[in-house]
Amino acid sequence: MLEVRALTAGYQGGDVIRDINFHVETGEAVMIIGSNGAGKTSLFRAVLGLLTPSSGEVEFQGEGITGLATQRVARLGISFVPAERHLFPRMTVQENLSLGAYPNRPDPTTMQVVLDLFPRLAERRRQHAATMSGGEQQMLAVGRALMSQPRLLILDEPTTGLAPKLAAEAYRALGLLKESGLTVLVAEQQVPLAMALSDRGYVLENGVIRKQGTSAELADDPDVRRSYLGIA
Amino acid sequence: MASILDGIVLGLQFGLLAAGLTLVYGLGGVLNLAYGQMAVLSAMAVVLSMEAGLAPIPAVAVGLAAGGLLGLLLDLTILRPVYRLHGEARVLLSLLLTLGMAFVVDGFLTWRYPTKALTLRIGGGPVEILGVRMVRGGVVASAITIVVLAGLIVFFRKTTLGRAVRSVIEDEEGARLVGVDPQRMLRLILVITGVLAALVAVTRSLVTPVSVTAGFELTVSALIVTVVGGLGSVGGAILAGVILGIVSTIAASSIGTVLSLIILLVAAAVTILIRPSGLLGVKE
């Protein structure tokens, strides 16, 4: 579904990610793990067209999308939930969700699915996004991303700023989405949660992919155990 | 009481003008200092259409279309280099380029049509509102302005396109992530606010002549109202417009026209000192 080949990108003053190769197949959940500053966010931004790659290719469903404008990538069926969420603060929960379906009117069935997944959002439909707690904002960000009925959902550190209980709850929701057939790509520092969700994973260190494998293989890897799972 | 009602008539127009300025700024970080000139050019389009033999209402339609076209032209021409910049540099370049354009337009108009002014007269005697006799033109102007402002609010609150425009003001990256093209929204708003500028010129001309030199005064009034109301806030623009309209009218009738602009500026300065983000503005 998503194919990234030899992708190199960065900001003025140097490349942040170099020669990245990875792929996501339909129906899979794939994780990219790495510490702070490893380049996870830059990698996603380059895929989404928020950062122009200096070389390499990104293909989505067989179509080249390298450097395509973000809004066009979004309309092709990739929904991205950034770590900073980028909600519309002075708009209501309802309006935020409706905009997720842009340029279409929100589909009532999809809206119901989202509200069933996150009942808190239903309770707060008329509240402004800015007035909600971090956990609720994260739910709203995921909910908004789902409103367009995406083919691929990409999440950048969905547990940022969440208490452990809420983080686990976020992953429970992602698990349900995966079961319903949605393809998920997630970058995460809280590796155990991501590992339980994902079929496969990649380890990103200093802007390059160091390891890859199924979640079980990575869970057995001594380096991964030491660095990301806190097991000696 | 009469001054308060007159102030509301003026204030609603201030509000409409400022709404145009604040939307473009909130959406694209572009400060359009040629906004008053856009209103005047539209007014001249109405004058020339009427001189060419058109009836007032079709002539007004030509004027409104001219306003929208001017907004589109702005987007397609002198704002192009502005779009390549971001942040403060973008605001600054837009300010300089549109100010330059304002001078060129003013110069052209005073050279070519030095004595022209748009005056639209509505027949019939004064109308009595709350026991005050009001000039019919002022009442009609206010009614049109209120309807348009209400229409704008409905557009922004209820329509998909209007919400998409707001999403860009709220969070541009978030907007792009849901598939909204900020550049197209900005073009749309430049066209809409161009029509609004034309509408202000037309409604103003129901009360007082709009001369070729009115541009800067309109822009300055709009700027003051925008800053007091809060950048990026349409509701703030309307509220500040009405308040400043009343202040300005009372000042003009009790102290004199010369001092009313100074009082307006003082009121703006005080607001900014107390609430730097404006009445309804967002805190950065």
Image: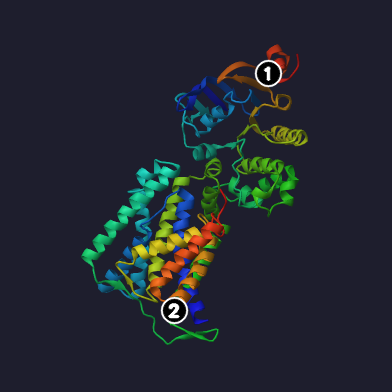
Q: Where residue B53 appears, x then y in whole percent?
A: 26, 74
- In the image, taking residue B162 as reference, residue B86 lies left or right, namely left
Labelled pair 2, 1 in contact (Cβ < 8 Å)? no
- In the image, taking residue B110 as reference, residue B244 lies left or right, namely right
**Residue at the image point whose x is 70% and y is 24% from the top:** A191
In this figure, which residue is indicated by the disc labeled 1?
A: A214
Q: Where residue A3 appears, x then y in whole percent?
A: 54, 24
Q: Where residue B68 appears, x then y in whole percent?
A: 38, 59
- For label 2, count other residues whose C-alpha is less than 10 Å away and answer few (under 14), some (14-19) or many (20+): few
Question: Secondary structure beneath disc 2?
Answer: helix
Judge if badges 2 and 1 mark residues of a common chain.
no
**Farthest residue in the left direction?**
B111
In this figure, which residue is indicated by the disc labeled 2?
A: B253
Instruction: Tell me if residue B66 can be seen.
Output: no
The front one of B90 and A159 is: B90
Q: Where residue B4 appears, x then y in whole percent?
A: 51, 77
Subunit bearing disc 1: A
Disc 2 to disc 1, how far (Cα)? 80 Å
